[in-house]
Image (cartoon, rainbow, N blue to C red):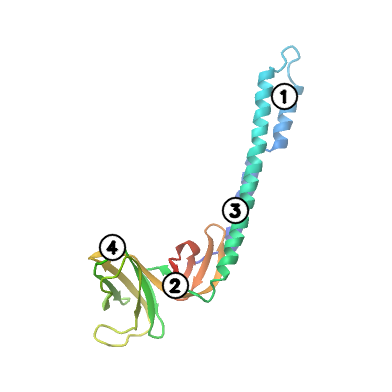
Amino acid sequence: MAVDSVNGSSTNQSSSSQLQQQTLSQSDFLKLMVTQMTNQDPTKPMDSTQMVAQMAQFSQVAATQQLQQSFDSLATNLSGDQFVRAAGLVGTEVLVPSKAGKLDDGKLGGAVNVGTSGTYVNVTIKDQAGNVVRTLSLGQPDAGLVKFDWDGKSDDGTQLGDGVYQMSATSGGTAIDTFVRGKVEGVGASGTDGTYLQVAGYGGALLSQIAQIL
């Protein structure tokens, strides 16, 4: 998954600039009000009720802008804090939702999300041509994430070559989600999607996609 933090930043700055250009500032509002009062008809002065209403609008605009600035500041701080915390995950293993995993040095680790306890759970592994090469029986585990490890051998005991293999799983005959296990190699930031992790054997995974830290 390609993530470009530079492009994301430029896009955010451009959107922010356009928003500022389209928003009526406090200064603009005050100038319009003063101009209106200066050019009013002396024989028909502005109604006091109307002036109070405009002043209320002015106060509302000011409060809204201050609130928006507070939200922007909070979002920036939270984003930076999340990035720093994610950096602490480098070197650890995590589970990421995926329908494929990479067999590396004869090892592939993963997990399945079992919804109902006591059902028979099976994991099917296929090669790139779509051929079933191994079926793993996980028995009748409790509900939740259930880990498994594949040694890279086919059902007849043949050691298969390293590479990417497809994964699927069922619980009581119903399809369930599969996850791949990988080590976090780095941390990045996307201007639109937030913090992401670079996971070995998988690629870029958003922090929100991580199912479990091992």
Q: Amino acid at mark 4?
A: Thr
Among numbered discs 2 and 1, the one appearing first in the sequence: 1
Among numbered discs 1 and 4, the one appearing first in the sequence: 1
Q: Position of residue 138 (x, y in %)?
A: 28, 74
Judged by depth in the image, the label closer to the viewer, 1 or 4, is 4
Question: For residue 149, which quarter of the picture?
Answer: bottom left
Element assignment for label 1:
helix
Element assignment for label 3:
helix
Q: Residue at x 70, y 18 (%)?
A: 46
In the rendered image, which residue does mark 3 sit on? 75
In the rendered image, which residue does mark 2 sit on? 202
Judged by depth in the image, the label closer to the viewer, 4 or 2, is 4
Q: Position of residue 56 (x, y in %)?
A: 66, 28
Judged by depth in the image, the label closer to the viewer, 1 or 3, is 3
Up-down relation of residue 2 to residue 48 (above or below): below
Q: CA distance from mark 1 to mark 4?
A: 69 Å
